Image (cartoon, rainbow, N blue to C red):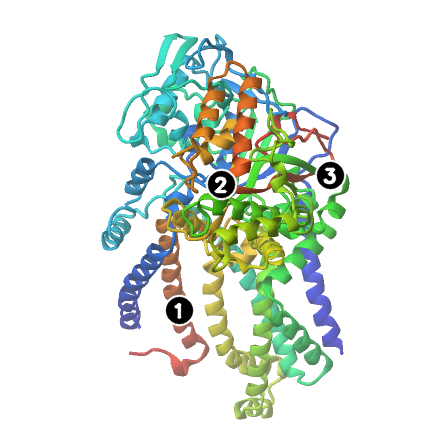
Amino acid sequence: MTGYIFRRILQAIPVFLGTTFLIYFMVFAMPGDPIVALFGDKTPNPAVVAQLRAQYHLDQPFIVQYLIYLGGIFRGDFGLSFSGEPVTAILARTFPVTARLAILALLFETFFGILVGLVSGLRKGKLFDASSLAVSLILISLPIFVIAFVGQYVFGVWLGWARTTVSSGAPLQDLILPALVLASVSFAQIVRLTRASVIETSGLDFVRTAYSKGLSSRRVIPVHILRNSLIPVVTYLATDFGVLLVGATITEGIFNVPGVGNTLYQAIIRGEGPTVVSFVTVMVLIYLVVNILVDLFYGLLDPRIRYVK
Amino acid sequence: MNITKLGVTAITLAAIGALTLSGCAGGGAAPASKANADAIISTNGSEPQNPLIPTTTTETGGGKIVNSIFAGLVYYDATGATVNDVAEAITTDDNTTYTIKIKPGLAFSDGQALTSNSFVDAWQYGALLSNGQLGSSFFSDIAGYSVETDSPLTGLTVVDDTTFTVALTAPLADFPQRLGFAAFYPLPASAFADMAAFGESPIGNGPYMLDGPKAWKHNEKIDLVVNPSYDGGRKPKNGGLSITFYANEGAAYSDLLANNLDVLDSIPDSAYGTYESDLGDRVVNQPAAILQAVTIPARLPHFSGEEGTLRRRALSMAINREEITKIIFSGTRTPASDFTSPVLDGWSDTLTGADVLTFNAKQAKKLWAEADAISPWTGSFQIAYNADGGHQGWVDAASNSIKNTLGIDASGAPTPTFAQARTAIADRSIQTAFRSGWQADYPSLYNFLQPSYATKAGSNDGEYSNPEFDALLARGSAEADLTAANSDFQKAQEILLQDLPAIPLWYANVTGGVGPDVHGVVFGWDSVPLFTEITKG
């Protein structure tokens, strides 16, 4: 087990170096001069531009810029944004907000998704099943910004039940509406995954055996059916958690959540190399960690795929 | 069926419960009392792109804050007129050397004295090349300024604590008008010890001050409260400002509709169709000091000399400005009739030759044919624009207007980002006409004309050069009074209307919305509300 984790962490090192290099290269190759754009429609004085370019090392060749950046990372220095703020401070400010939003969304989609999926699967072909399939189809086919705008208008502007945008500090009650919006699409996926998996498991021999042993459905459904149906759902949830953690740009934009997606989007627009690369680097790390955790979690659900070596 | 009902009901109940909870919490934030002087006005903004140092604040996100927490020698009132703020008197005999006397006994919000040195040191810092301040070019007319080496402004002399003199390199009649711009604000002595820390939590002398050292919550908001020691013409009628940073204008608009926001200074494109019915009499729509144009450099084939002038005039008359401002912009733009802006002192819509800015299909065809007689037209006419700025609609409409009128191939040429478009324009690699915009730094005709069209001027991206025009600008700058200066500038504009180095299209209006119990919202010449005048309740 320890050896397995160690090997996985070793594998993460080249992935980390490769992604930072690629991202840095892509930001570097972005057309246009971010310093010139800082001046808006006005044409800047070339000497001031040169001065600023030197300040952000933009006058160096690509590989030197990258090495300076990489050297900084190992000293815990992720560079400065154009407004002079250390990128580490930006990371420390935005990740907790996005993490709160992601966890909230994950709780909503897991709870409601598995519940509805399980009931649907057990009552295959009945009215509840048909209507939940229809609802999930609608949710899957709607683009998220439509759901977000409709949710914002109905609950924020029209009914006034929720704040239209997230207020400063991103308190939990303000995040409920964006979290529900974020959860909606994944909720539909989880309903469908759980339903299909439950239907398949219910027809297997060990379930019939369990029933014929005289076990009640109150024991068979959670222990024998649900537990064995959850593997695809857990895989999906894990990837989804990764996606949610690295920020939901559109939803965060619509609800003005001061999180990762929103900040990253603005940094990309401004061509702020250090901010973009540092954000993506942390995202890569999160993905790697979440993936290792999921692989370990499989073992708890199904002893046959436990890593024993 | 039982499970069916139960399931659906449970989900609905949970959702309603969750939303009701959040609704309660959100509603408690805004106490509704009668008009009171302590009410905090909430408004939209954007995360400042630079530290909050006046000499490096050139964009609106930071500008809104800096203008609220600092007071310059002068400020601009609602009509764009210059009013003394910190200055007691600004005098000159020859428009070249100015003597500036400031009010005695003033202080910054933390008690540090405000003296002549507060201005002189701040300007020296802002102008020094190695400090890399984005607003350094504002000092370029002061003696000693250099863009090549670190050179002190030798034109600044401190006479005593309340008097200093400024020597310019050439006569400038509108120099006092410029002094309300952020770059000319004073800095307290403590700023120079640690400019980075100061930029994060600045100490100013303006009508407002930061609500504590941590008031700037990056990417979220900044809270300002009234500065009790400010004693100028901009004394706030409210208790402070809370500027929320929105990454997306749509989110700000939703907040206005839900009464979470008191003042919104721009309506997002997506709401152009509905804002009038959504807001009714809560809409504020005023012209602004922003001109949008299309620049056609003379170096492009077919656009030099006599042929180029004919073609520019033909293109200008082929664009139906009335229709585009009405349909594409829903009345949030006003067709241009000159190269400046209607909010300025001295603006006129009856300049000789202004008819070239009116749609006239017959005349356009005729001029185009005359140009074809000199050298037949080849290729297609393209207007470059940045695709990340919401310009596609009008560029396509203008291109179609040209295509239909002149029967030539015309289209938009998008580049993905603003940075990319500006880079191509600045290094002259752009091979088409391009969208250009000008937002004034201070309310003066000169500021619209000199930077964009004077020979070798900083933002003269079309590389226009006309000695007659330059001479009129210089003469206007040397005039003793503003009316005479403006009349010279108008004559200079009449030359531009002949040559059309850029084709003026329309003035942007500032279109905003206010909350139901908010009063006194008037936009200044710079399209930013005069926050100190706003009352609530």
Q: Chain of mark 3?
A: B
Tell me the crowding category of disc 3: few under 14, some 14 to 19, or many 20 or more residues within 10 angstroms, Cα based: some
Can I make out residue B309 in this image? yes
How far, Cα to Cα, is label 1 from label 2?
59 Å
Residue A271 lies, in percent from the top left, at 40, 50
The residue that mark 1 highlights is A291
Q: Position of residue B420 (x, y in %)?
A: 41, 51
Q: Which mark is residue B86?
A: none
For the residues labelled 3 and 1, the Cα–Cα distance comes to: 52 Å
Residue B463: x %, y % from top left: 41, 40
Mark 2 residue element? loop
Q: Nearer the viewer, mark 1 or mark 2?
A: 2
Residue placed furthest toward the front: B373
Q: Amino acid at mark 3?
A: Arg
Q: Nearer the viewer, residue B320 or B245?
A: B320
How far apart are labels 2 and 3 at the CA level? Answer: 39 Å
Which residue has dot 2 on it? Answer: B501
Q: In the rendered structure, the residue with mark 2 lies on which chain? A: B
Residues A294 and A62: in front is A62
Q: Is residue A121 left or right of residue A98?
A: right
Element type where label 3 sits in the image: helix
- In percent of width and height, residue B394 lies at 59, 52
- Relative to B360, residue B523 above or below: above
